[in-house]
């Protein structure tokens, strides 16, 4: 952090205000400021450092990859093989399994930060970031644990808070009336507290299916809400990962033919999922992912539990009552607890004062993949591709290379910038 130069912030306050508030520090950052110390932020910092560019990461939590460390369940493993999930410039250890566990992945990220000497500023919550068009730089306002305020001033801002910054909790009629616990998967660790309980899992994505399987392993009685159609694929087919096979086939065949192949093999390996209440969408799994970003569910054993009746499939919820759920098909069933596997959302609109690159509606770049990584005035995005860790790595490389060209072209101006007294 020795490259930072701290100066006193401007104080245009009256006597009473000075007594009641803590002065704002101002820190000039010659390189980019990165918001978020998850895999996307770490990848961006490493790629920049490889190109000789220092950066500063601001992280609201007290650790790297806080989502992975604090908001994931115990049995979680990477859903894709490790070679597709490694960050740029450092592979996974060779002794790691093909699908590393949650704790192995966290260890990898910590080793990654150590290897590249990346030292984020923790417990620093970004409250706002706005481009100063008069002076030509970004003003990033952050608050620490003791409410101390800091303004970071930089020429490049990299948004790496990702797609999963905040838990998404849907509004369900009667939620306040339900007597049992209602938790989001971000608070779920294992099925142990739910042993012998009737649990309704809302959401049939990868998390919902895996939570149901975990509940079964702890002798709970889960039901899962399947409101829409869903693609379920085997995690592996023909002796290799389904994802890896898909990527290889796409090099030679159009997406429609690859989808047909995947569905044919899935039908052979998994059977007709419609017979157990899991209707497939009209679009193929890869085409649907390309168009909507909706990821196919990879089967880890949940389908077998559905067929055996250990996991019950239910339709959409109409309303909740004191101890039951009424479904859209008119059925009513009693439950002891509800787990919301309803995913996450971006929080970018809550702090980024910019409306050209990012949508106010969903907090994602307006331009679709692969063109959503770059905005105007030195604004960049890493980790918003809806393509997981491979997408983050792709973004990080592009952003670092683009800033490298700007860095060289503006080297003299940057040196002058760090010596200029800010207004």
Image (spheres, rainbow, N blue to C red):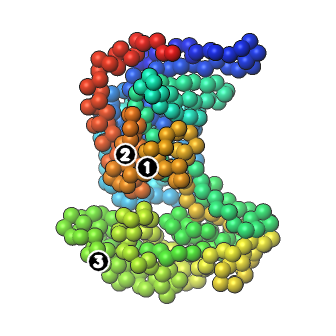
Q: Residue at x 35, y 35 (%)?
A: 46
Q: Residue at x 43, y 49 (%)?
A: 365
> Which of label 3 and label 2 is nearer to you?
2
Instruction: Tell me where residue 137 sits by quadrant.
Output: top left
**Looking at the image, residue 326 lies above or below residue 7:** below
Local crowd size for mark 3, using a 10 Å CA cut-off: few (<14), some (14–19), many (≥20): some
| Residue 326 falls left or right of residue 40 | right
- Camera-nearest residue between 20 and 109: 20
How far across and down, in percent of the image, does residue 411 sit? 29, 21
> Which of label 1 and label 3 is nearer to you?
1
- Camera-nearest residue between 129 and 6: 129
- Camera-nearest residue between 413 and 166: 413
Question: Circles 1 and 3: CB distance less than 8 Å?
Answer: no
Q: Residue at x 19, y 67 (%)?
A: 252
In this view of the protein, can residue 363 be seen by the observer? yes
Say which residue label 2 marks. 373
> Quarter of the image containing the N terminus?
top left
Question: Circles 1 and 2: CB distance less than 8 Å?
Answer: yes
Which is more N-terminal, label 2 or label 1? Answer: 1
Say which residue label 1 marks. 365
Instruction: Tell me where residue 323 sits by quadrant.
Output: bottom right
Say which residue label 3 marks. 261
């Amino acid at each position: 952090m020795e490259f930072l130069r701290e100066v006193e912030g401007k104080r245009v306050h009256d006597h009473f205000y000075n007594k009641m508030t803590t002065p704002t520090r101002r820190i000039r950052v010659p390189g980019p400021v990165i918001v978020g110390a998850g895999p996307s932020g770490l990848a961006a910092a490493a790629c920049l450092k490889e190109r000789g560019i220092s950066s500063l990461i601001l992280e609201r939590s007290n650790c790297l990859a806080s989502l992975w460390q604090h908001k994931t369940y115990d049995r979680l493993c990477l859903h894709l093989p490790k070679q597709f999930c490694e960050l740029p410039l450092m592979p996974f250890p060779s002794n790691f399994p093909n699908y590393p566990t949650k704790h192995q992945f966290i260890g990898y990220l910590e080793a990654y930060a150590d290897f590249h000497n990346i030292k984020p500023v923790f417990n620093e919550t970004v409250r706002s970031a706005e481009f100063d068009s008069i002076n030509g730089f970004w003003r990033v306002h952050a608050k620490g644990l003791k409410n101390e305020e800091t303004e970071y001033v930089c020429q490049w801002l990299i948004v790496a808070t990702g797609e999963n910054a905040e838990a998404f909790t849907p509004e369900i009629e009667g939620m306040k009336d339900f007597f049992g616990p209602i938790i989001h998967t971000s608070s779920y660790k294992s099925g142990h507290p739910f042993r012998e309980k009737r649990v309704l899992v809302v959401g049939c994505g990868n998390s919902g299916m895996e939570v149901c399987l975990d509940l079964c392993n702890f002798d709970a009685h889960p039901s899962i809400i399947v409101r829409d159609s869903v693609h379920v694929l085997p995690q592996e087919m023909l002796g290799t990962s389904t994802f890896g096979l898909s990527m290889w086939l796409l090099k030679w065949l159009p997406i429609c033919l690859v989808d047909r192949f995947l569905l044919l093999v899935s039908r052979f390996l998994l059977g007709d999922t419609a017979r157990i209440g899991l209707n497939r969408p009209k679009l193929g799994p890869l085409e649907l992912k390309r168009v909507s970003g909706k990821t196919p569910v990879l089967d880890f054993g949940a389908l077998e539990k559905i067929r055996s009746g250990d996991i019950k499939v239910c339709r959409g919820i109409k309303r909740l009552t004191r101890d039951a759920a009424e479904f859209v098909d008119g059925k009513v069933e009693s439950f002891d607890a509800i787990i919301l596997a309803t995913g996450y959302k971006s929080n970018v609109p809550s702090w980024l004062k910019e409306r050209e690159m990012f949508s106010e509606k969903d907090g994602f770049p307006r331009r679709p993949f692969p063109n959503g990584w770059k905005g105007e005035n030195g604004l960049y995005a890493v980790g918003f591709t809806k393509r997981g860790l491979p997408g983050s790595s792709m973004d990080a490389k592009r952003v670092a290379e683009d800033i490298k060209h700007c860095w060289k072209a503006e080297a003299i101006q940057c040196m002058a910038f760090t010596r200029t007294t800010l207004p």
